[in-house]
Image (cartoon, grey):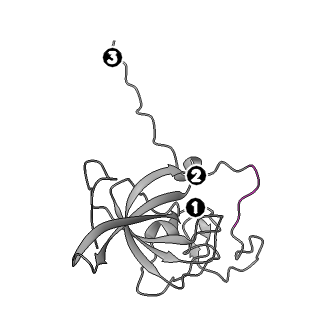
Amino acid sequence: IILLFNKPKPPIMSELISHEKAFQKQNNVFLNAKNVLSKKTKSGVRYYKKVGLGFKIPKEAIEGEYIDNKCPFTGLPTIRGKIYKGLVISTKMRRTIVIRRDYLHYIRKFKRFEKRHTSLQAHCSPCFRVNPGDIVTVGQCRPLSKCVRFNVLRIEPQKITGNLKKQFVMF
């Protein structure tokens, strides 16, 4: 007897992301409109905006079903101020990543440079898939929490192997 088993389907993205008990909706979308005036996608009405500064809107932000008020593409924060590039060290927090920025500091007495680094936390929207070792571009926005003042704008999936905390990578 030959038994045929169906392969289990991968979970839908909304099942992976939604853990909240309250009804999730975007602030800028009225769901009970009779005629649709906003941008409509396959899944329905969805609000998204351009961040500016030459950054493209990710496809997942336009077609996805996630709700994130702190996302720069589908939420409220605006990007202004500093733009940084850094190496992703940790993705253990929910929707927050830790970035390491390496730089050289000049010492006049010895006429040489020394290696230094600083780390910062950034909000990572569900439209990005970030892994440790990737290089991300972050932009400054209003304070999103006690320590988070940056938002991820672009990812370069450049896998850096080895111990990430010992690597010195400048951009």
Q: Which SS type dominates the magenta stretch?
A: loop
Q: Which residues are magenta?
A: 21-25
Point out the tag, 2 or 1, that comes first from the N-terminus.
Answer: 2
Point out the tag, 2 or 3, that comes first from the N-terminus.
Answer: 3
Q: Secondary structure at mark 2?
A: helix
Q: Which mark is residue 170?
A: none
Name the residue tied to disc 3.
2
Q: Secondary structure at mark 3?
A: loop
Q: Is residue 127 left or right of residue 26?
A: left
Residue 38's image quarter? bottom right
Name the residue tied to disc 2.
17
Q: Residue at x 29, y 76 (%)?
A: 107
Query: Could you tell me how far apart the alpha carbons at marks 1 and 3 are, in whole angstroms?
Result: 40 Å
User: Pointer 2 and pointer 1: residues touching (CB < 8 Å)?
Assistant: yes
Query: Could you tell me how far apart the alpha carbons at marks 2 and 1 are, in whole angstroms?
Result: 9 Å
Q: Is residue 62 left or right of residue 111?
A: right
Point out the tag, 1 or 3, that comes first from the N-terminus.
Answer: 3
Q: Position of residue 64 (x, y in %)?
A: 53, 63
Out of 61 and 63, give the one closest to the viewer: 61
Out of 31 and 55, give the one closest to the viewer: 55
Q: Amino acid at mark 3?
A: Ile
Name the residue tied to disc 1.
65
Depth-wise, is mark 2 or mark 3 nearer the camera?
2
Q: Secondary structure at mark 1?
A: loop
Q: Residue at x 28, y 69 (%)?
A: 114
Q: Quadrant of the N terminus?
A: top left
Q: Is residue 9 above or below residue 67?
A: above
Any part of residue 120 in sight: yes
Crowding near pointer 2: few (<14 within 10 Å), some, many (20+)? few
Residue 2's image quarter? top left
